[in-house]
Amino acid sequence: MRRIRITLAFAVVGAAAFTGIGAAGGGGPAPGVALGWDGIAAPSGVRYVALAAGERTVVAVVRRNGGSIVRYGSVPGILGVPLVAFDGTPGGLSRDGRTLVLSSFTGGPEPAARTTFAIVRTPGIRLQRLVTLAGSYSFDALSPDASTLFVVEYLTANGTRYRVRMIDLRTGRLLPRVIAEKGVTTMSGQALTRATSPDGRWAYTLYRSPEATAFVHALDTVRRQAICIELPWRGEAQNGLEVAGLSLDPRGRMLTVRQPGVGTLATVDTRAYRVTVSRRPVAVS
């Protein structure tokens, strides 16, 4: 057992240095997945790190304080911790920390022929279900009770058109309903950053669209509905949003868009969806 623990500890360090940044980066329709690197942090003081091991994926439970490995398990296939935005924000862990979703990689230049999600019970690392879908999908959000998995379905090869779908995790089936505002069938844009409400119900994602517009996609994972909150910035200033961040106050009632070195760009009242603008984003080179 000691020998295995040493090997895994080395693998965590090696994968972090080799694949973590690449998995979070650039091309393709989806932000991708993280293999190694920081994984995703749980409220219990550990983080879950996915590591490729042949035709399987090892999931290591690593203490955030000190980095020691508490336990590990494995699931079939090469899967990673899903990223929900191109700034590297991870997702996939339920509000109570007892369910972890891993995903196959769909972030390449060509759409995936099929996508696999592994539903893992934690902290014991026990595979609960494998869900395989025909087509290219990525993880979007998880309801607080981990009964519903929200996924992004990519409708074009370059990922510019997509829609949000749901998977019932009690059955593993993709539901026919599309999550969209009234009159909207598909979405377009690049997910830049994400903030989640303290109760895990709301997922707020800052997007920049190909039309050089900006909006926040507010997804209610309990009522299974969404609203797009338009932001007023257009044109070259959009570049500044690539480094912007989202944050919520402790009660989840005020969403702040902030650009490092510039300050608060805008705030959004999450109950009335009222936007208050402070300044324009500053284009970055």
Image (tube, helix red, strand yellow):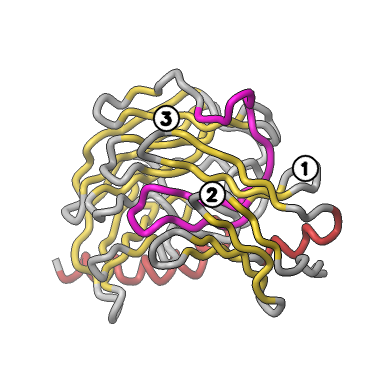
Residue plotted at (68% across, 30% down): 157
For label 3, the residue is: 166
Q: Residue at x 67, y 40 (%)?
A: 109
Residue at image mark 2: 272
Report whether 160 appears left or right of 31.
right
Total labels drawn = 3
- Quote the CA–CA distance across marks 3 and 1: 25 Å
* Coordinates of residue 13 in the picture (x, y in percent): 40, 71
Q: Position of residue 42 (x, y in %)?
A: 30, 63
Residue 222: which numbered mark, if any? none
What residue does disc 1 label?
A: 210
Q: Is residue 84 left or right of residue 77?
A: right
Q: Earlier in the sequence, mark 2 or mark 1?
A: 1
Amino acid type, mark 3: Met
Question: Under tag 1, what secondary structure?
Answer: loop
Label 2: which secondary element: loop
Q: Position of residue 71 (x, y in %)?
A: 19, 62
Question: Quarter of the image containing the N terminus?
Answer: bottom left
In front here: 203 or 26? Answer: 203
* Residue numbers of the magenta segment: 179-206
- Residue sitting at x 78%, y 55%: 233
Q: Nearer the viewer, residue 141 or 252?
A: 252
Q: Residue at x 26, y 44 (%)?
A: 120
Amino acid carrying mark 2 in the image: Ala
What SS does tag 3 mark?
Answer: strand
Frontmost of labels 2 and 1 is 2
Q: In which quadrant of the rendered view does residue 228 lie?
A: top right
